[in-house]
Amino acid sequence: MKEKNGLLQKIVGAVGIALCVVFVPLLLINVTLIVKSYTSPDKVPDFLGYKPFIVLSGSMEPSIMTGDMVFVKETDPDSLKVGDVIAYKSGSAVVTHRIVEVKSENGETRYVTQGDANNAADQGLVKPADVEGIYQRRVAGAGNLAMFMQTTTGMILFVVCPLVLFVLWDVIRRQLESRKEVSRTKELEMELERLRAEKG
């Protein structure tokens, strides 16, 4: 019985650690992004200088696929050069394309960009002020997952279910601790009875 309880406690402990490792960082990142989106609504929120974007088109395939999530890092626009992949504001959207030419317009730097899968450069020049950051890495399919998480089903699976699991884990943990305490108390009582019997 003790071995079973010990194994159950280890399993519950491992589940608790896994929940914390996975969900605490996600919660911290999401809270930071949400707070920044409210405090600076005119800016794309970042976490430690990194900004996530969901790829909605195939203009950068095969290096970046539709449905990927890309991460860009804030950078000094003056350090950008031909070949760099950048994310930049284009109206209300954010585009992730490659710099194919750096120009000077009235003494100011401008970037000509183009998607790897496109046959022509983008219309309009990109201003340094419109650059959100330089591309760092992508997570394949994470964009689709992020969009799914915004749906009702996604919210249930990725927010409600983890919270329910966390509550259940806490209840089970407390029950196991209570049983352990009761068992320890009984053992102490039995030991006291034994000592009394020996003295008697």
Image: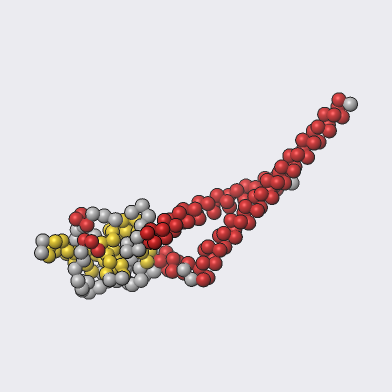
- In this view, the residue in front, 148 or 120, is 148
Q: Nearer the viewer, residue 36 or 72?
A: 36
- Which of the 4 image quadrants contains residue 28? bottom left
Q: How is the image coloured?
A: secondary structure
Q: Position of residue 26 (x, y in %)?
A: 46, 56
Most distant residue in the front direction: 39
- Residue at point 37%, 55% (across, down): 47
Residue drawn where x is 65% and y is 47% of the image: 9
The correct choice, above or below, for 4 with respect to 98 in the image is above
Relative to 8, 63 lies left or right? left
Look at the image and tell me whether residue 36 can be seen.
yes
Is residue 45 toward the left or the right of residue 11 in the image? left
Tell me which corner region of the image, top left, top right, bottom left or bottom right, holds residue 90. Answer: bottom left
Find the residue positioned furthest to the right: 200
Q: Position of residue 38 (x, y in %)?
A: 39, 61
Quadrant placement of the C terminus: top right
Residue closest to the far top: 199
Front in this rendered view, residue 73 or 65 = 73
Q: Residue at x 53, y 70 (%)?
A: 153
Task: Give the tally of numbered discs.
Answer: 0
Spot occupied by residue 2 in the image (x, y as percentages of width and height): 72, 44
- How far across and how far down the image is residue 141, in percent? 41, 66
**Could one spot residue 138 in this view of the protein?**
no
In the rendered image, the residue lying farthest to the left is 106
At horizontal 20% and vertical 73% (from top left) the residue drawn is 123
In the figure, is residue 20 to the left or right of 167?
Answer: left
Q: Nearer the viewer, residue 80 or 83?
A: 80
